[in-house]
Amino acid sequence: MNHEHPCQPAESCLRRSLAELKTFARREPGQAMAAAAGAGLLINLLPTRWVAGTAAVVGALLVRPVLLSLGVTKAMELCCKNSSTTDRS
């Protein structure tokens, strides 16, 4: 691990997932090949507009709750931070 650029949580999650996929591919090469071929066929057979439209609809549905939860989390963080600094003074 590089100490100048510490590993971020998303990066470590991606690395862990890739490592799990590699071990799965080594343990079950036939299943891994079938899954890769199936995913490739599915991606190539589905219309691009349908895939992009579905991703856009799902993304639009998730934006509001995600932003709301992030706002609430930040507000809680600020409230807890302010209350802890006022307790010390």
Image: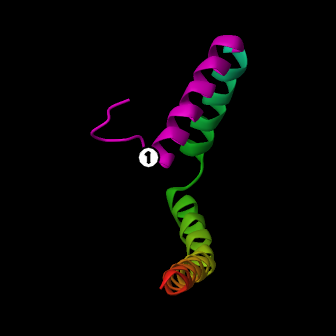
Q: Provide the major secondary structure of the magenta segment.
A: helix
**Can you give x and y, in whole percent of width and height, for residue 42 in the image?**
63, 42
User: Is-magenta flag for residue 2?
Assistant: yes
- Could you say which quadrant of the image residue 64 lies in? bottom right
Q: Is residue 79 above or below residue 9?
A: below
Q: Nearer the viewer, residue 31 or 85?
A: 85
**Can you give x and y, in whole percent of width and height, for residue 77 in the image?**
54, 77
Mark 1 residue crowding within 10 angstroms, few (<14) / some (14–19) / many (20+) = few
- Could you say which quadrant of the image residue 80 lies in? bottom right
The magenta stretch spans which residues? 1-28
Q: Is residue 50 above or below residue 86?
A: above
User: Is-magenta flag for residue 49?
Assistant: no
Number of dots carrying numbers: 1
Q: Is residue 27 left or right of residue 46?
A: right
Q: Look at 46% across and 42% down and name the residue there.
A: 11
- Residue farthest to the left, as pictured: 4
Q: Nearer the viewer, residue 51 or 22?
A: 22
**Can you give x and y, in whole percent of width and height, for residue 28 in the image?**
72, 15
Q: Nearer the viewer, residue 57 or 37?
A: 57
Residue at mark 1: 8
**Can you give x and y, in whole percent of width and height, for residue 30 in the image?**
70, 14
Hey, what amino acid is under mark 1? Gln
Q: Is residue 64 above or below residue 31?
A: below
Q: Look at 57% across and 44% down and name the residue there.
A: 43
Q: Look at 63% across and 27% down and name the residue there.
A: 20
- Could you say which quadrant of the image residue 59 lies in? bottom right
